[in-house]
């Protein structure tokens, strides 16, 4: 018997009209719908008059339930995976089920649809040509510091998910490193109170009221790209090509960049 298919079905992140015709069709056709929160999904299914066997698949049962869903797929049953909102496998347990299916040679069909990260990014006004998605920051302060330190060196636009009660704390942490960096708070996307708060970290902290409610995507402008010509190794190469020997080229580049010769030697020789 042929194996069934796992369909990844995105659901609205607020506005129910954002469900696609194809997702509705698949939800009507599959044998089982696996949902992160069955009560939440039942409301959605009722709204669209879809009646299907519903089973839970979430962070706390994903090991045992994952194995059961794989058994069903192997029996030829088709399954639609939906999470609370948005695209399954983006900051939710969908990822683990996809990995299991791939290990077991079960076909996975992703359906396009809403995801908060991209919805926020496209209206942020920040660079969309290259970006990174970091999901939620860790809650433990030591781990947060390590991650923040790393991502603030990132040159691409950074997309984070953040809980409303932690947003101010995160912005204050950002302020201590990069108060002038542009950030965008995308709040309650696709809902009645959808809002974008844009500005530098400092400005956004002033604009934010005392109580922040709703769902939040935080977008941070990437670090300034180092000018290509300003990169030590490129400058040294330029002088080497111009006919200088290595010692002269390093000395000249160090002078131009205003850094000590010894540091320049370390930068260049250390790379070899
Ligand atoms: N899989 C989902 C997706 O594709 O966006 C994300 C799941 S993650 C558990 C939930 C987080 O997504 C929320 O805490 C919030 O940061 C963000 N989010 C979801 N819906 C949102 C909305 N309508 N507006 C802003 N952020 C939202």
Image (cartoon, rainbow, N blue to C red):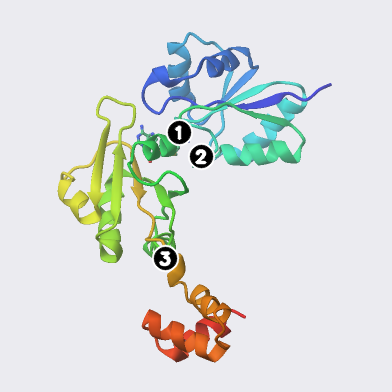
Instruction: Give the label on residue 115, or none.
Output: 1
Within-10-Å neighbours for mark 2: few <14, some 14–19, many 20+: some
Q: What residue would you read off at disc 2?
A: 90
Q: What residue would you read off at disc 3?
A: 227
Quadrant for the C terminus in the image:
bottom right
> Real-space Cα distance between discs 1 and 2?
8 Å
| Residue drawn at point x = 39 percent, y = 79 percent | 257
Q: Nearer the viewer, mark 3 or mark 2?
A: 3
Labels 1 and 2 touching (C-beta < 8 A):
yes
Residue nearest the viewer, comparing 154 with 170 = 154
| Residue drawn at point x = 26 percent, y = 65 percent | 176
Is 223 on the left or on the right of 201, as rendered?
A: right
Does dot 2 land on a helix, a strand or a loop? loop
Residue nearest the viewer, comparing 102 with 61 = 102
Within-10-Å neighbours for mark 1: few <14, some 14–19, many 20+: some
Give the tally of numbered discs: 3
Q: Return the x and y of residue 265 as percentages of the image width and height.
A: 51, 87
Does dot 3 land on a helix, a strand or a loop? loop
Q: Return the x and y of residue 50 as percentages of the image width and height.
A: 52, 11
Q: Which of marks 1 and 2 is in front?
A: 1
Quadrant for the N terminus in the image:
top right
Image quarter for residue 120?
A: top left
Disc 2 C-beta below 8 A from ligand 1: yes
Q: Return the x and y of residue 158 as percentages of the image width and height.
A: 41, 51
Labels 3 and 2 touching (C-beta < 8 A):
no
Residue nearest the viewer, comparing 123 with 12 = 123
Q: In which quarter of the image is ligand 1?
A: top left
Q: Which of marks 3 and 1 is in front?
A: 3
Image quarter for residue 15?
A: top left
Residue nearest the viewer, comparing 191 with 47 = 191
Instruction: Give the label on residue 244, or none.
Output: none
């Amino acid at each position: 018997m042929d194996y069934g298919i796992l369909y990844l079905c995105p659901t609205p992140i607020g506005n129910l009209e954002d469900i696609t015709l194809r997702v509705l069709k698949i939800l009507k056709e599959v044998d089982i719908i696996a949902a992160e929160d069955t009560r939440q999904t039942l409301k959605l299914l009722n709204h669209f008059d879809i009646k299907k066997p519903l089973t839970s698949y979430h962070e706390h049962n994903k090991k045992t339930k994952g194995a059961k869903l794989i058994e069903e797929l192997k029996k030829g049953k088709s399954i639609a995976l939906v999470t609370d909102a948005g695209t399954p496998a983006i900051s939710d347990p969908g990822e683990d089920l996809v990995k299991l299916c791939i290990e077991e040679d079960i076909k996975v069909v992703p359906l396009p649809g809403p995801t908060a990260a991209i919805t926020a990014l496209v209206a942020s006004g920040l660079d969309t040509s290259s970006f990174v998605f970091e999901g939620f920051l860790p809650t433990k302060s030591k781990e947060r510091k390590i991650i923040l330190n790393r991502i603030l060196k990132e040159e691409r636009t950074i997309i984070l998910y953040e809980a409303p009660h932690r947003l101010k704390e995160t912005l204050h942490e950002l302020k201590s490193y990069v108060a002038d960096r542009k950030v965008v708070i995308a709040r309650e996307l696709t809902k009645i109170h959808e809002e974008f708060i844009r500005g530098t970290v400092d400005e956004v902290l002033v604009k934010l009221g005392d109580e922040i409610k709703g769902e939040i995507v935080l977008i941070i402008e990437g670090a300034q790209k180092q000018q290509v010509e300003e990169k030590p190794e490129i400058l040294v190469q330029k002088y080497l090509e111009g006919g200088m020997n290595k010692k002269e080229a390093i000395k000249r580049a160090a002078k131009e960049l205003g850094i000590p010769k010894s540091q320049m030697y370390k930068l260049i020789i250390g790379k070899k």
